[in-house]
Amino acid sequence: MTRIAVVPGSFDPVTLGHLDVIERAANLFDEIHVLVVHNPSKAALLPIGQRVDLLETAIAEAGLPQSIRVASWSVGLLVDYCSDVGASVLVKGVRSQVDVAYETPMAIVNRNLARVETVFLLPDPSHAHVSSSLVRQVASLGGDVAPYVPRVVAEYLQPSTSAELLSGKEHR
Ligand code: PNS
């Protein structure tokens, strides 16, 4: 039986911490679906298609296993996607007790909705302070995000691009 796991998130943008968790997940499961999900509680910087493109390039450039695919999901429950692709496990990276407290109710609800279990993975401690929201803030203020994100994201988030995205010229 093929063990399929979904790694969901906003990935706005993907960080080195995300890549670390995706690689760990790929070492545990036969097939990984990295799923870009619209989170209505967060103001997005990048269009979803752009997040998918950046993830695909970052995963390829990092030499991660071919068993990883990237998709997006914007309609319906996350567990509906899991049912569609035959996944019974969600993987979430947790950097701290704060993340565990945030993720636990969602894990219980997803289990109750569709018997989808959630596995929490710890990223390397060197990534414990890295978050997409921090990257968005630094990029929007013209700072260098290269220490926190894959090369392709750092190149994409040049100050001119960030300014354009923030001014709303980019299609979301
Ligand atoms: O990277 P994020 O923003 O912390 O990811 C949060 C995300 C997108 C994984 C979360 O918002 C989510 O699971 N959304 C799916 C909506 C859903 O199925 N909700 C009901 C069960 S919790």
Image: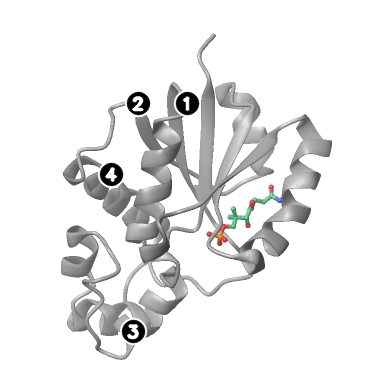
> What amino acid type should be assigned to the residue bearing mark 2?
Ser
> Which residue is under mark 1?
29
Q: Label 2: how many residues lie within 10 Å, few (<14), some (14-19) or many (20+)? A: few
The answer to whether residue 23 is above or below residue 87 is below
Q: Earlier in the sequence, mark 1 or mark 4?
A: 1
Q: CA distance from mark 1 to mark 4?
A: 19 Å
> Which residue is under mark 2?
67
The answer to whether marks 2 and 1 mark residues whose Cβ atoms lie closer than 8 Å is yes
Disc tally is: 4
Report the residue at 45% width, 67% height from top: 128
Counting from the top left corner in percent of width and height, residue 149 is at 28, 64
Q: CA distance from mark 1 to mark 3?
A: 34 Å
> What amino acid type should be assigned to the residue bearing mark 1?
Phe
Secondary structure category for the residue under label 3? helix
Q: CA distance from mark 3 to mark 2?
A: 32 Å
> Which residue is under mark 3?
138
> What amino acid type should be assigned to the residue bearing mark 3?
Val
Q: Is residue 92 left or right of residue 151?
A: right
The answer to whether residue 2 is above or below residue 18 is above
The answer to whether marks 3 and 4 mark residues whose Cβ atoms lie closer than 8 Å is no
Q: Earlier in the sequence, mark 3 or mark 2?
A: 2
Q: Earlier in the sequence, mark 1 or mark 3?
A: 1
**Ligand 1, image quadrant it occupies:** bottom right
Secondary structure category for the residue under label 4? helix
Which mark is drawn over residue 56? 4
> What amino acid type should be assigned to the residue bearing mark 4?
Glu
Q: Label 1: how many residues lie within 10 Å, few (<14), some (14-19) or many (20+)? A: some
